[in-house]
Amino acid sequence: MLRLLRPKTDLRTLITLLAVASIVIALANSLYAAWRVQREILISNTLEANRVYAAKLAATTGQFFQQAQSQLAWTAGAIGARFDDDALLQTEVERLRQQTNSFNSVVIVDAGGWVRAISPESMMLKGVQLHTDSAREALSRRTALIGQPSISAANNLLVFVSRPVWSASGSYLGYVGGTIYLKRKSVLNELLLSQFYRDGTQLYVLDRENRVLYHQNGQLVGKKIAPLLPQSATSYASSGYQEINNEQSVPVLAGYARVPDSDWTIFVLKPTRITLAPLSNLLFQVIQRSLPLALLTLAAAWLLARLIAMPLWQLARKASQMDAQDAAIEINGIRSWYFESSQIKRALLSGIGLMQMKIGQLKSEVQTDPLTQLLNRRGLQAVLDYLATTRQPFAVLALDIDHFKRVNDTWGHDVGDRVIQRVAQQLKNCARQTDVACRSGGEEFLIILPGADHDTAMMMAERVRQATQRQTIEPVGEVTLSIGVSCWLAEREAIAHCFRRADEALYSAKRAGRNCVLAAALQEEAREPICDR
Ligand SMILES: Nc1nc2c(ncn2[C@@H]2O[C@H](COP(=O)(O)OP(=O)(O)OP(=O)(O)O)[C@@H](O)[C@H]2O)c(=O)[nH]1
């Protein structure tokens, strides 16, 4: 950006760029901030929703186990007094399995580990001594148990729930237990399956060794997976949430909860990408809807920036051309519609005023003869430049005071100066408004007559000669002039030639006896001098 802003970048571009850039940055920033906030809200809401969902499932599963335990407790109480009655035991296991619908199979085992009754009987385990981990644990611990999930002899992944059976006198008789198949259809399976899985949400039920006890994908059940949380399962809080990667390394929002009375943990995972998908759509819609207004704002900012920059830009351009002829007029025409620009405009105008006054002063000082206030040679040159540029024809009178040396010698230099001043005044009096009189040296003068032809010039010269002669200058008395006349015809010659001819005519007039007017020889042809002797 800064590379774009080279020193020559003009103010309009600079201000417009800044205005547009600041609006674009502000818009992008507010969109980004809104997106960040919405993202955080969406993520934390989803994490909390997953945690609540997992906690609800854990509570429901826990309730199922409690219900199963109380059903086993009822049976244990019922058979405690008549533990020898095999028919009763068989009736009770059948009733428990078929009426409660909680278990896939029910078994009553005595204190030695021998199966006394089993439902369904087709399992052919009656009279068999059980050696499974769950069976051993039930016998040794003699408390209500939810065993670790295990693979049965028939290759079923199952969980065994048991309850001890006590006699009326308080001696341990054995236990009654029920198995729930985790892979096959079971109440627990149906309970979890009935939950609503949407938007790619996945449900995992894991035991403490990270074995999958339930997942929508039945293929996973029974398999061990990598821990979903970095910490060990036993250190989980009862419920919580975390952003993690699932076993396919996909970022997911995880809610989890421990199932009461078991070492099971329920995980509800929703992919972060799916969670945030509506936000991207929302952002796209926001951009789409706000685009016309944003473009309008940009256009307004652009216009306003141009309006603000315009007077400054125009003033800056004119500031670099303050010596131009029409600078003041042009600066005056700039619309400075706000305070700062009008102050700058005023400063520029007064600067130009001062500068032009100073230049004018210098010019007139440089171009004016201090003794006579006529133009000097430099002033004359400016007039000639103008006439040459505009190709305007003019006539020139070259005038010289006769015998001026005598005046100086007789009455002194001061009187000589006064004579020069009086003659200059006389020239001014005789000249028309467009004529230009100038003191070209000592007692020599020139008069330029723009647009005058030869005859007019001769008449004018004669008038000047006579008027000068007529006046009396004390103490000198009469003063006379010799005058040479020539005309400049723009197309024919250089101005210098015309002046040379006027000078030559003047010297001819001197030679002819002074106090006379002589025209320059134009085509080698001499003219008769107009003399008054
Ligand atoms: N008082 C005064 N004298 C000046 C000034 N400039 C030139 N002069 C004198 O003017 C005189 C000119 O004399 P010349 O050039 O010999 O000519 P002239 O005496 O006028 O004789 P012609 O021109 O031949 O008629 C000289 O004495 C100069 O010193 C000036 O500014 N003031």
Image: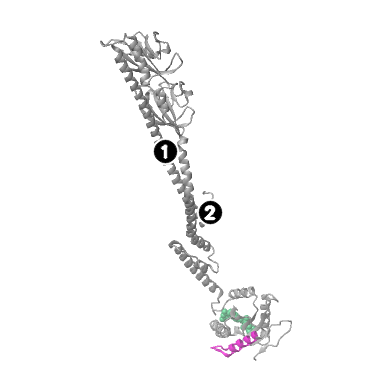
Within the image, what quadrant is residue 40 found in?
A: top left
Magenta span: chief secondary structure: helix
Whether residue 188 sits left or right of residue 292 in the image: it is: left
User: Looking at numbered disc 2 in the image, what kind of residue is underneath it?
Assistant: Pro
- Is residue 48 magenta-colored? no
The residue sitting at 51% across, 57% down in the picture is 12
**Residue segment shown in magenta:** 456-480
Q: Nearer the viewer, residue 270 or 497?
A: 270
Whether residue 282 sits left or right of residue 172 in the image: it is: right
Tell me the residue that label 2 is attached to: 7
Q: Nearer the viewer, residue 201 or 447?
A: 201
Q: Is residue 146 visible?
A: no
Tell me the residue that label 1 is attached to: 42
* Residue at the outermost right position: 524
Q: Position of residue 299 (x, y in %)?
A: 49, 55
| Mark 2 lies within 8 Å of ligand 1 (Cβ measured) | no
Whether residue 469 sits left or right of residue 181 in the image: it is: right
Q: Quadrant of the C terminus?
A: bottom right
The residue sitting at 44% across, 46% down in the picture is 30
Circle 1 packing at 10 Å, graded few (<14), some (14-19), many (20+), is: some
| Mark 1 lies within 8 Å of ligand 1 (Cβ measured) | no
Q: Which mark is residue 178?
A: none
Give the SS element for disc 1.
Answer: helix
- Is residue 467 magenta-colored? yes
Q: How many marks?
A: 2
User: Looking at numbered disc 1 in the image, what kind of residue is underneath it?
Assistant: Leu
Q: Of circles 1 and 2, which is in front?
A: 1
